[in-house]
């Protein structure tokens, strides 16, 4: 068992437990932003959702699902890639991706938590929401998948995955005296590094990896179905919503994973553990996902342009030339630009971190914009009865709450990095061989 | 068991929106909320324009998409045909609102005290108390605060609550007492007919024997219990005019 990336001056590896001034500032900043988001949300709780810009469809001409639902779709989408990368690298023995498996798992857990929080924030009665979804759950509703499957299935499974995958490392760091020792001991929870225990651990991890991917695919497909099964809303109804959701989820998730990996690499002093091959793999995956996402976007555009049903055509007009056109074209341009950046690197076979991060940011922003376009225009401009067209754009309360969610996610990830080695200390190669 | 339906005779409707008013008064709905809305449409270009009207209550669909998507069963269909919301159970996700192709659902974006025209009416006014006897705030109605139906669920809109979904209930509180919904009762030209379609002797059954009804957005497969006679189904060439401009 090889312990890697020992930081000089600290007994714990990878800067765990060492809170520098920059880290303090980071935590403070994130707490402030999250606090501001909480303030905005509390205003919403006390005065009602009237303080947001959401309104009813129909006579009010608004969008009852606004930025929060866009963010639910985005965050849950981001969670998809992390766990899949971690599982796939274990099952298919992609050695190059092993060092970032924990980063990937952490991204999944963090975005799932924030995504679920966004679901609750969007409810008129959040507490009743949790209670009644337990008491009266109706699995026939795709909302069940959005919330219960994710809250009761995917999130616990991802947490168990993260927990078990790191137990071996927990046992290693638990031996070092530190303020975090109790936490590490708890994490290791009696794990003894015997041959039998290791073998059992490896087997469990392998089968968990095999099992978790279908679970997450089913749960996340229901995210697309939330929209796809709605006959009464032009632009939503269709069998492609499920796959479309997954493709965009893969692109945005990989993009976020790539950025987080680059940040972690930087934090650990440009460690060799995260070498060029990691980025090469991530870049290739992202290339495929972004190409598929762009393909879906273009197919959607063409379908809309030739749409015969009158309502679909009106919606297409609104997207292509109307009030949503700037978001529509910017999202396509960003996705295409990100893809070109990746293609150039693939062509020259030189995967560089800077351009990769830039491509990731472009693709992730495009995915977010695309989610916005899936959720909003069908509400304001695609009513089957001839209501006057409506409008919606989030206001500061909604932006503040969403910024708070991002800050909370960053805080969670930051705290984890400071509490536990973010790169596996042990070489997983033997794990794979045994499994 | 009675099966309730409504017929809207578009040849009679004159677009006066008395039904809209009656609904608001009966159900004490807040500002900007119209459980019964009457479209006023304009077609063609000036001077060749034509006006038409289309009252739009909840269609109380037999194959209601709003019921199907509700994650907690708060939106439900009764055996007598009414589609209702259990306000005690609704979690305010607004999924039913988006699943409904007719745009009849309204979320309570704020508390009823604030949404009940408090900026234009002084509810503490002494003259108003003369009318209400000062018993309850005038925007409240004890009838709406009861549980109704075999299921004994809190479905009549109550005195409204923040953070739930509401819509036309066919005035369940009146129907249970054998009365017509307020809109039907108020229509000055009898363009709205309500009753039990399972009973061959009911006025609505008589009506349906002589007039051929059509349903709104038939292609959506929702099987509405509200039927229209006369007029013609709306199409995108109709322009809605005079949409109520009230803000919530
Ligand atoms: S009109 Fe809308 S709200 Fe009413 S029953 Fe049909 S789908 Fe549900
Ligand atoms: S808003 Fe209420 S009634 Fe409508 S789907 Fe959600 S829980 Fe059900």
Image (tube, rainbow, N blue to C red):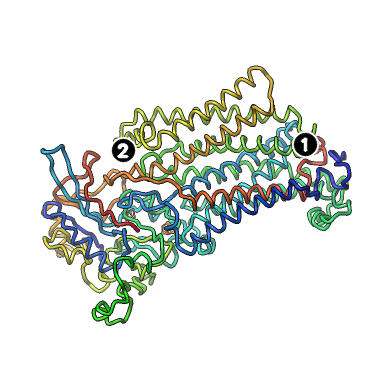
Q: Position of residue B131 (x, y in %)?
A: 24, 79
Locate the N terminus of chain A by quadrant.
top right
Q: Quadrant of ligand 1?
A: bottom left
Position above or below: A74 against B121: above
Instruction: Using the image, tell me which numbered label, if any, was put on residue A432.
Output: 1
Q: Position of residue A267 (x, y in %)?
A: 75, 39
Instruction: Using the image, tell me which numbered label, if any, was put on residue A369.
Output: none
Q: Between residue B179 and residue B187, name the one nearer to us.
A: B187
Position above or below: A389 against A282: below
Question: Residue at left 44%, top 38%?
Answer: A239
Q: Position of residue B244 (x, y in %)?
A: 26, 54
Label 2 sits on a secondary structure element that is helix
Position above or below: A316 against B211: above
Position above or below: B150 against A71: below
Q: CA distance from mark 1 to mark 2?
A: 53 Å
Chain letter for the residue marked with disc 1 in the picture: A
Question: Residue at left 82%, top 44%?
Answer: A199
The residue identified by callout 2 is: A311
Left or right position of B122 against A250: left
Which image quadrant is residue A214 in? Answer: top right
Label 1 sits on a secondary structure element that is helix
């Amino acid at each position: 068992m090889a312990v890697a990336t020992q930081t000089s001056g600290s007994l714990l590896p990878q800067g765990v437990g060492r809170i520098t001034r920059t880290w303090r500032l980071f935590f403070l900043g994130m707490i402030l932003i999250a606090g501001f988001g909480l303030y905005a949300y509390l205003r919403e709780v006390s005065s009602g959702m009237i303080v947001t810009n959401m309104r009813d469809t129909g006579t009010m001409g608004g969008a009852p699902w606004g930025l929060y639902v866009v963010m639910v779709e985005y965050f849950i989408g981001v969670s998809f890639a992390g766990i899949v990368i971690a599982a796939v690298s274990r099952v298919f023995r992609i050695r190059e991706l092993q060092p970032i498996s924990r980063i990937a798992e952490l991204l999944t857990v963090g975005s799932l938590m924030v995504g679920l929080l966004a679901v609750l924030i969007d409810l008129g009665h959040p507490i009743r929401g949790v209670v009644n979804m337990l008491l009266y759950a109706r699995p026939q509703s795709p909302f069940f998948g959005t919330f219960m499957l994710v809250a009761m299935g995917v999130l616990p499974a991802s947490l168990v995955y993260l927990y078990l995958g790191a137990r071996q490392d927990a046992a290693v760091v638990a031996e070092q005296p530190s303020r975090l020792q109790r936490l590490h001991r708890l994490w290791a929870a009696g794990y003894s590094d015997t041959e039998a225990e290791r073998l059992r651990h490896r087997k469990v991890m392998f089968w968990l990896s095999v099992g978790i991917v279908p679970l997450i695919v089913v749960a996340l497909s229901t995210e697309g179905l939330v929209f796809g099964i709605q006959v009464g809303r032009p632009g939503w109804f269709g069998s492609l919503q499920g796959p479309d959701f997954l493709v965009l989820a893969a692109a945005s998730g990989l993009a976020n994973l790539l950025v987080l990996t680059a940040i972690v690499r930087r934090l650990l002093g440009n460690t060799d553990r995260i070498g060029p091959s990691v980025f090469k793999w991530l870049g290739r995956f992202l290339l495929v996902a972004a190409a598929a996402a762009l393909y879906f976007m273009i197919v959607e555009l063409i379908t809309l342009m030739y749409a015969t049903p009158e309502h679909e055509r009106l919606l297409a007009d609104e997207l292509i030339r109307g009030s949503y056109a700037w978001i529509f074209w910017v999202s396509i341009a960003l996705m295409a630009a990100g893809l070109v950046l990746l293609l150039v690197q693939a062509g020259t076979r030189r995967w560089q971190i800077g351009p990769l991060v830039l491509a990731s940011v472009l693709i992730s922003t495009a995915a977010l914009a695309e989610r916005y376009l899936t959720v909003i225009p069908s509400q304001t401009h695609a009513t089957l009865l001839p209501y006057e067209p409506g409008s919606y754009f989030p206001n500061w309360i909604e932006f503040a709450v969403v910024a708070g969610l991002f800050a909370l996610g960053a805080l969670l990830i930051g705290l984890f990095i400071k509490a536990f080695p973010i790169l596996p200390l042990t070489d997983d190669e033997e794990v794979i061989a045994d499994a | 068991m009675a099966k309730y339906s409504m017929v809207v005779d578009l040849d009679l409707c004159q677009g006066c929106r008395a039904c809209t008013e009656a609904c608001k008064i009966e159900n004490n709905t807040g500002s900007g909320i119209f459980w019964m809305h009457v479209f006023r449409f304009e077609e063609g270009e000036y001077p060749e324009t034509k006006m038409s009207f289309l009252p739009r209550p909840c269609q109380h669909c037999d194959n209601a998409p709003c019921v199907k998507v509700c994650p907690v069963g708060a939106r439900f269909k009764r055996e007598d045909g009414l589609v209702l919301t259990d306000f005690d159970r609704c979690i305010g996700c607004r999924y039913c609102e988006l699943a409904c192709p007719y745009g009849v659902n309204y979320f309570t974006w704020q508390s009823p005290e604030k949404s009940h025209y408090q900026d234009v009416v002084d509810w503490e006014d002494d003259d108003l108390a003369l009318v209400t006897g000062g018993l309850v705030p005038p925007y409240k109605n004890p009838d709406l605060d009861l549980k109704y139906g075999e299921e004994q669920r809190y479905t009549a809109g109550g005195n409204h609550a923040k953070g739930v979904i509401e819509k036309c209930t066919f005035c369940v509180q009146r129907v249970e007492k054998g009365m017509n919904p307020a809109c039907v009762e108020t229509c000055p030209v009898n363009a709205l007919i309500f009753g039990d379609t399972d009973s061959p002797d009911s006025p609505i059954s008589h009506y349906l024997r002589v007039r051929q009804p059509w349903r709104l957005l038939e292609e959506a497969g929702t099987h509405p219990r509200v039927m229209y006679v006369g007029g013609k189904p709306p199409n995108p060439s109709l322009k809605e005019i005079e949409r109520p401009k009230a803000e919530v």
